[in-house]
Amino acid sequence: MSKKAYHHGDLRAALIEATRQLVEEKGPDSFSVSEACRRAGVSTAAPYKHFKDKTEMLVATVLEGMDRHRDKMLAALEGVPEGSPDRITAIGMEYIAFALNEPGIFRLKFGGFTDRIADPRLEEGGQQSFAILLAEVAKCLGEPGITDEVRRRGFLLWSFVHGLSFILHDKGLADKGGEFDLRTLLEDVSERMLR
Amino acid sequence: MSKKAYHHGDLRAALIEATRQLVEEKGPDSFSVSEACRRAGVSTAAPYKHFKDKTEMLVATVLEGMDRHRDKMLAALEGVPEGSPDRITAIGMEYIAFALNEPGIFRLKFGGFTDRIADPRLEEGGQQSFAILLAEVAKCLGEPGITDEVRRRGFLLWSFVHGLSFILHDKGLADKGGEFDLRTLLEDVSERMLR
DNA sequence: TCATAAAGTTAGCGTCTCTAACATATGTTA
DNA sequence: TAACATATGTTAGAGACGCTAACTTTATGA
């Protein structure tokens, strides 16, 4: 790494990181490519050697976040006994933790920004996370595999945790949610849904 | 109304309607004030006599949508017997119907666009809708009023329906949800949550 | 009636996305 | 190693957008 190289080294990764930071700081809607360039120390035309357009830059950033998200959910399962409903709760807690810790990325992914993109990699990532949940639901229900009933229950659980994540973002509603203990809520719902 | 009046008549309402249409057509993120002006047939400076800035224009449009939303939820309750859990289902169905019929407005409200606005009218509108649900939950549970337990159950139900609405937006996931009958899902969840 | 306020207009600044044309580094191959 | 091709940067600029300032036209009411 020379002190002032013409070439950056790994501008693509640097831009993704700058994008991630800015999306958290300013919010997904007021993110600008120019500002990411300033932060990465390159001209405003540089990104277009790595990304087709602004949207593709955001998608790449979301994908990177989803990878981290999935890894964390898997890590949260370690040490929790197989077949225990606690594993469902652990996944839910991690899901919500990500939504609260990285609200910008979360909204970028699910808030409708990348709606009309239909990037297959985005959907694939979501399916992978959903599959982790379904596997646990199957074990808890004692089902042999991913049956219709497993998908149904998983879908219900996911809807709940997903909605809860969104609601907890909103300040005024976070107050409402703040009345309750998160883990207790999740355990309650898991128990009701898996019964 | 003269054929070519210098003054519009009710530009504010016309801009809100144009905004509503464009948000549905192009999505909340690619909405532009300029285009709304073109559609309303005025210059691009005209809106600033009625709205402080672009955000206030979007907030006004969201507020108008929330009013319609609340009216529809109340209308959905008519004819359904008091104290019946069907009333909970009816509210949920209407909530989801609005989310699916007006996805642009729904995402504008809940997707994080108006996040840092903290307009008290926005929060008030949300509270009013939530209160409708809570009243029904109280009756179903046979509770005397809005007790802690009522708020807790209502919060769970709302989280679920809210998350379901978001998930049903996503094409790839709508397929997943499409496996199931919506009303049956809602009845199932209501029953589990109110038990 | 006529001053004033309300509600339009045009002109223009600064910012943003993205493209075109050019410059510089890297790597492959004769 | 020389030379060419490719990858990755740059500057310049077009066109859209948000918003403001200054001006014009209509409506209001003392």
Image: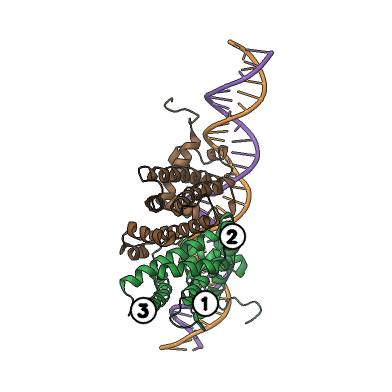
Chain colours: A brown, B green, C purple, D orange
Q: What is the three-letter code of the residue carrying label 3?
A: Gly
Q: Is there CB contact under 8 Å for labels 3 and 1?
A: no
- The residue under label 3 is B142
- The quarter of the picture where residue D1 lies is top right
Point out the tag, 3 or 2, that comes first from the N-terminus.
3
Chain for numbered disc 1: B
Badges 3 and 2, same chain: yes
State whether residue A46 is above or below residue B180: above
Discs 3/1, front: 3
- The quarter of the picture where residue B36 lies is bottom right
In terms of secondary structure, where does tag 3 sit?
loop
In terms of secondary structure, where does tag 2 sit?
loop
- Mark-to-mark CA distance, 3 and 1: 25 Å
State whether residue B192 is above or below residue A139: below
Q: What is the three-letter code of the residue carrying label 2?
A: Glu
Discs 1/2, front: 2
C12, A45: nearer the viewer: A45
- The residue under label 2 is B179
Q: Residue at 41% of width from left, 57% of height from top?
A: A165
As drawn, the label of residue B72 is 1
| Position in image of residue C30 (x %, y %) | 69, 13
Q: Is residue B95 left or right of residue B141?
A: right
Q: Residue at 43% of width from left, 61% of height from top?
A: A193
Chain for numbered disc 3: B
Tell me, yes or no, if residue A47 can be seen here: yes
B126, A41: nearer the viewer: B126
Q: Quadrant of the C terminus of chain A?
A: bottom left
